């Protein structure tokens, strides 16, 4: 739970680095202006330029999350008897190491491709941390593994896949290459909007099911995160519209509210920074919540036959008899 709680602010700070275009504020890695990253003078960091402050802060927070991940792996291997959970904890460590290397290579080579990959791997690590918290939770251990996949589990799984696809599209929009033709931007925006509509339809379907079907309505561990997921997607749509407004102005074909008339788009203004970064962070939160719903449904929604007593890997929960 501590790992999850620390990873979300890390995603937020990483979004700030990109929004402020501060990724190259420190030109070397793993050092910071030829200092050991952890020994960089505190005064130079706190009183230096803002882009240096957030970039170096991002590195320190990412390193701290990495150390916490190592601790989680050690505790898991010491106290959890399930082999698949142990190996899954190692996959979390591999992801955080990969993300750190990608961030470093992004600085050393200054390539947009690496920035896009870095933006896609970060949410994957966040999801892995959420999954590990689920696997080691009391409700997971106490539940009996179902023998058949519930229809709601499949819907939640597809929703999570769509949420990640949306993040990949967003990463490409955040890190456009200068040699791409203008048509690529239009295609990416159109795809981003289409997936957003499909994702909204999926979460509304999920919300309808948890409010009308008895086996879902009575299960709070599934119903509550589903309702949170629906709220997050609705908030994300509002933030997405806000991002377009603060970055590209109001569309000419859409009636503009009187309160927005005369507003001037200001690059790296407070409103733009907060809106864009919040849109990025909430996107990762949607993915994590969708995965949590899918995991809870896969574990808690029983099939038609008696569940096996032994604890099994979630990878086998989708196999029907």
Image (cartoon, rainbow, N blue to C red):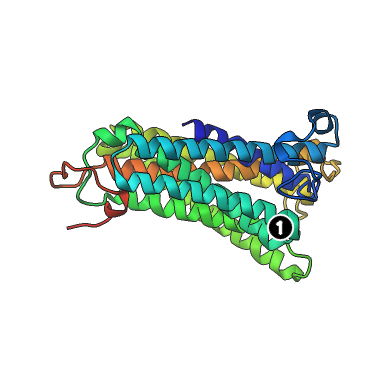
Closer to the camera in the image, 319 or 248:
319
Residue 72 in sight here:
yes
Q: Residue at x 52, y 50 (%)?
A: 95
Density class for disc 1 (Cα within 10 Å; few <14, some 14-19, many ≥20) is: some
Rendering coords of residue 55 (x, y %): 74, 42
- Is residue 30 positioned above or below 182 on the image? above
Q: Measuring from the top left, give residue 195's x and y in whole percent.
A: 54, 57
In this view, 319 is above or below 264:
below
- At 50% from the left and 30% from the top, the residue drawn is 2
Q: Is residue 125 left or right of residue 20?
A: left
**Residue drawn 76% across the image and 68% down it:** 182
Q: Secondary structure at mark 1?
A: loop
**What residue occupies the far left of the structure in this picture?**
306
Residue annotated with mark 1: 175
Q: Nearer the viewer, residue 106 or 209?
A: 106
The picture quadrant where one finds residue 279 is: top right
Q: Name the residue located 47 percent from the left edge and 41 percent from the top edge.
A: 129
Q: Is residue 167 left or right of residue 300?
A: right
Residue 273 vs residue 131: left or right? right
Give the quadrant of residue 180. bottom right
One can see residue 238 in this view: no
């Amino acid at each position: 739970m501590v790992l999850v709680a620390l990873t979300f602010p890390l995603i937020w700070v990483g979004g700030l680095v990109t929004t402020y275009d501060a990724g190259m504020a420190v030109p070397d890695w793993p050092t910071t202006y030829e200092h050991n990253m952890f020994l960089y003078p505190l005064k130079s960091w706190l009183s230096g330029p803002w882009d240096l402050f957030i970039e170096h802060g991002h590195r320190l927070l990412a390193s701290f999350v990495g150390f916490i991940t190592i601790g989680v792996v050690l505790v898991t291997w010491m106290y959890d008897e399930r082999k698949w959970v142990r190996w899954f904890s190692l996959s979390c460590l591999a992801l955080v190491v990969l993300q750190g290397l990608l961030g470093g290579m992004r600085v050393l080579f200054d390539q947009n491709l690496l920035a896009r990959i870095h933006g896609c791997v970060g949410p994957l690590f966040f999801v892995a941390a959420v999954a590990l918290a689920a696997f080691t939770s009391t409700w997971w251990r106490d539940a009996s593994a179902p023998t058949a996949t519930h229809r709601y589990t499949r819907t939640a799984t597809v929703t999570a896949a769509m949420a990640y696809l949306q993040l990949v599209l967003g990463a490409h929009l955040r890190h456009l290459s200068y040699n791409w033709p203008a048509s690529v931007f239009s295609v990416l925006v159109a795809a981003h909007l289409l997936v957003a509509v499909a994702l909204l339809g999926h979460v509304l379907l999920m919300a309808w099911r948890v409010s009308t079907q008895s086996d879902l309505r009575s299960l709070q561990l599934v119903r509550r995160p589903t309702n949170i997921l629906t709220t997050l997607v609705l908030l994300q749509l509002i933030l997405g519209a806000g991002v377009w407004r603060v970055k590209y102005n109001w569309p000419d074909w859409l009636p503009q509210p009187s309160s927005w008339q005369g507003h001037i788009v200001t690059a790296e203004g407070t409103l733009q920074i907060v809106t864009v970064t919040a849109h990025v962070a909430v996107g990762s939160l949607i993915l994590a919540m969708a995965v949590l719903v899918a995991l809870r449904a896969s574990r808690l929604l029983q099939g038609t036959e008696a569940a096996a007593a032994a604890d099994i890997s979630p990878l086998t929960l989708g196999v029907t008899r």
